Structures are given as structure tokens and as C-alpha cells.
Amino acid sequence: MTMSTGLLDDLPDFCGHEDRIAQALRGRPAQDITRSGIDFPHIRSAAAIALHMHQPLIPAGGDDLHSAAIIGNLQYMMEHPEIGDNHNASVFQWCYERMAEFVPELLAAGQRPRVMLDYSGTLLYGLQQMGLEHVLQSLRTLATDERYQGAVEWLGTAWGHAVAPSTPVQDFRLHVLAWQEHFAALFGDAALARVRGFSPPEMALPNHPDVAYAFVKTLLDCGYEWVLVQEHTVEQQGTGQPLVQKHLPQRLVCANSQGESISITAIIKTQGSDTKLVGQMQPWYEAQGLSRMDLGGRQVPPLVTQIADGENGGVMMNEFPPKYRQVVEAASGSAIPLVNVSEYLAYLASEGATMEAFPAIQPVHQQRLWERFHPGDGPERLAAVIADLHRQDQRISMDGGSWTNNISWVRGYGDLLGPMERLSSLFYEKVLRPGIPSSDPRYRQALFFLLVSETSCFRYWGEGLWTDYGKELCRRGIEFLEKAF
């Protein structure tokens, strides 16, 4: 495929090519660990870091909320440096491209850098809107140049940074598909075929059985081989206890109310969200205290994994660059290297340790549910059991878990969730159910409104301007659907 500008009629090129994308993923090559340069059989432990990059799209390109252009938050920051922390906008922009500076420098010095990158679709589109082609070209180099493919692993995500627990399952699938198509439009089908891991926005994992099942099925249907999960959003299957071997891969098992079960490899992000953990390269230092562990009768190196915002906060903006270089130099060729997850899993597979050997885990709070509900008893019985459990212990919630336990993606957002549900319902009624082709320009415009409106930022900061942004995007989407179809 010839890479495009990633834009069609000023909208992202993120739908209409589903068959071609599926074919590209079916033809992906196996992970080749012989070219990694890491002596996996002789290492003691390892560390992996991922940088999460995101900016929402907001109706802020003008003074009137109801007519303002939809622009990226980075652009808004650039245009209004006097507000809050917006003066950091230029530093943020540098953070989005700087790994294309660090990785080649370290490789040229004979080092073995590793980093995983997670960029939301709204950020990529915002960069396109701003005409920041040099930033996109830096990312394209990391995604396509063979010299850097061993050092940089791209992770898939949801295009609009939607949280899976409270996003309609059919919409979340659209986010996943849209990200894949947009990434391929920008960087090529071959680059997309190398994307094997999935990074959920806000590390939010559904724990409602039917939603969790649909979440994993979407990932598997879209070609993903593993998913990053936060340790406090899962529990041991069968006991409901916290994880014991959190530095080893797990087998995330999700059963639904119809009795169906599905599994995917899960890599555990330990601890809560703190950019200092990645900014100061804490995972590598934690790995110093670990040795090989038993996994299905095999002694394998444990992996300490962390993800953090790649641009947010003084530590990531200022302390990360020198610390990253320092740790890469110390880790290269050592018994405790930096690795990327897919090459680590490929090594385990070469040793015969596949997903079936991984400890089984499930979304948090499900054990309490399985003590009263048997998969296959149906959705009505499931709803009744969940309601009864919540009455007995209000700490038990099926709203899902994320990296922070003090934020709900549902409670307190009734004014926004109503319009969101209306927009989602209209999209289904007028677009999905009638089978409007995804190549139809009306489909693309409606999809844009739907995905942008479901961005998590509108449900993070509480009532105020950000929820107003979300409601306005819903209003525009509803109006378009009612007039165009």
C-alpha cells in the first residue's frame, strides 16, 4: 500500500478499507527474535516501558461553542499560551517526536534501546490538522524504517480514547477498527501488521461479564495478540485473590452470560498511574531485584512493565530524556535488558511457554459474581445478581476498573451520558443496522462525531467546560445523523 496523507475531505482516513486491513493482518509475519540482539536464554529479568500519547479533539476553534471548529487540544494550547499550563504546548509537541531522535542516537552508539508507543487517533489527527508533517514524519520513520523496528514497538488503542467499560460494545469495536485504518493510512499496512499489543485508554478494563467478553473478542477479531492491563483491575480466576506472579504473562479469561468464554494474553502494568515510574525508569530498577521464575515448569525471566503519559508533567518533560539514555546504556547487553513485550512473548513461545501455561485471571469482582451466577444463566439473571451484590456491598461495581479507583466513568455524568447514548443509538439505527457502506462519506462524518464524542477526557474532569465540549459534540453528531440519513 502507498501511504496517504491520512486525510479524506479533511476527515481522518479511518474507515472504508476493512477488508484490506484484515488481509494485511492475516498476512503478518511471525515475530523474529533472532534479530533482537538480546540473549534471552541468559538474562535474569527484564523491563519494558510504554509511552502513552493523547490529546482530545474539542470544539474550541472559535469563541462560540456551538459554531467553533473542532480542533486538537494541542492546537488550542498553542493558540492560548496564557491559559493554565498551555505554555507547555511546544514541549508537548517535542515529546511527540523526540523518540525519533533518541532511538537512532542510541543505536548509532551501539546501545539497545527499547520503547513501546501508544498514540491515540485524535492526537494523530490533531497533528495532521496543524500541518505538523515533520512530527508525523518522525513517527513514520519509527514505524517503517527497518533499522528501528526492533527498538520500537507500536501499540494499538481506541481511536477516540474511549473507555471500554462504559462505551457501547459496538462503538468500542469501531474505535479499534478506526485506529487500525488511520494508522495504516499514515504509516502503511506493513507497519500495522507489526502491531500486536493493545493499550486500553485509561487502562480501563470492563468487569461486567458481557462487556468484558465483547472487549476481548473485539481485540482478537482485530488481530491483537496481547493486552496491557493494570494489576488492580484483575484477580486470580477461581479465588478472586490479588495476583501473585504479576511480573509474568497472564491468561485473561472472560466468560459471558450466555456461557461463552474467551481468552487473551495479558501483560500486567503494576502499581497505579505515576509518570515518575517511567520518567525515572523505575521498572528497570525494580527488575534488578528479580530472578527467573517458574512458568509451567520452565524457568523464565520476569518482566516489569509500566506505561505513562509520554509528555505530561515535569518529570516526563525534563527528567525522562537523560534518565532513559542512562538506563539504556546500563541495560544494553546486561543480564537485565530493556525489552518490548512482543519480542519477550516470542521468546517464551520459542521455549514452549504459550498462553495455555500462563496463570488464569479475570476482571476484578467477578469471583463474587461466579459464586452466585453460572455463565449461561442469561443476561436477565446476571443483571439481578449484579444488582443484589451492589446492594450488599457498594464497593462492588461492574462499571469497570482503571488505573485510578477514585474516578467513575459513569457516576455524575448523567447530563453527558444521555446525549452520548442518543448519538450511539442513532448511529446504530441509521448507519449500522441499514448497512450503510463504510466508504460512504456520510458514514465517515457520522463516525467522526461518534468517536470524538466518546473521548474519555469529557468524563474525567467532572462537570464544567469539558463536559460542555462532550455535549456539544454529541449535539452536532445527532443533528448530522437526523439530517443526513
Image (cartoon, rainbow, N blue to C red):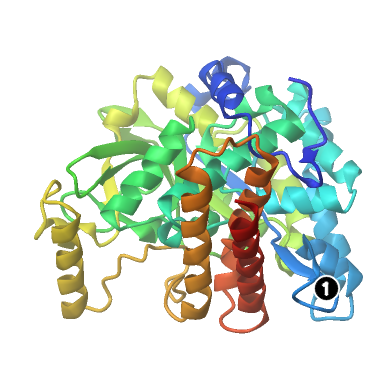
The quadrant of the image that shows the N terminus is top right
For the point 16% across and 78% down, the residue is 392
Q: Position of residue 135 (x, y in %)?
A: 85, 45
Q: Position of residue 463 (x, y in %)?
A: 57, 83
Question: In this view of the protein, which residue sits in the foreground, 134 or 269?
Answer: 134
* Residue at (43% x, 62% y) in the render: 166
Q: Is residue 58 left or right of residue 412?
A: right
Left or right relative to 485: residue 367? left
In the foreground, 214 or 62: 62
Q: Residue at x 42, y 51 (%)?
A: 169
Q: Residue at x 88, y 53 (%)?
A: 130
Relative to residue 117, is residue 36 depicted above or below?
A: above
Q: Position of residue 53 (x, y in %)?
A: 68, 54
Q: Please, is residue 431 above or below residue 403 in the view? A: above
Type of residue at label 1? Answer: Asn
Q: Is residue 337 toward the left or the right of residue 60 in the image?
A: left
Q: Secondary structure at mark 1?
A: helix
Viewer can see residue 257: yes
Rendering coords of residue 454 (x, y %): 56, 61
For disc 1, the marked residue is: 86
Q: How many marks?
A: 1
Q: Residues within 10 Å of mark 1 (few under 14, many from 20)?
A: some
Q: Is residue 289 visible?
A: no
Q: Foreground: 452 or 217?
A: 452
Q: In the picture, residue 335 is in which quadrant? A: top right
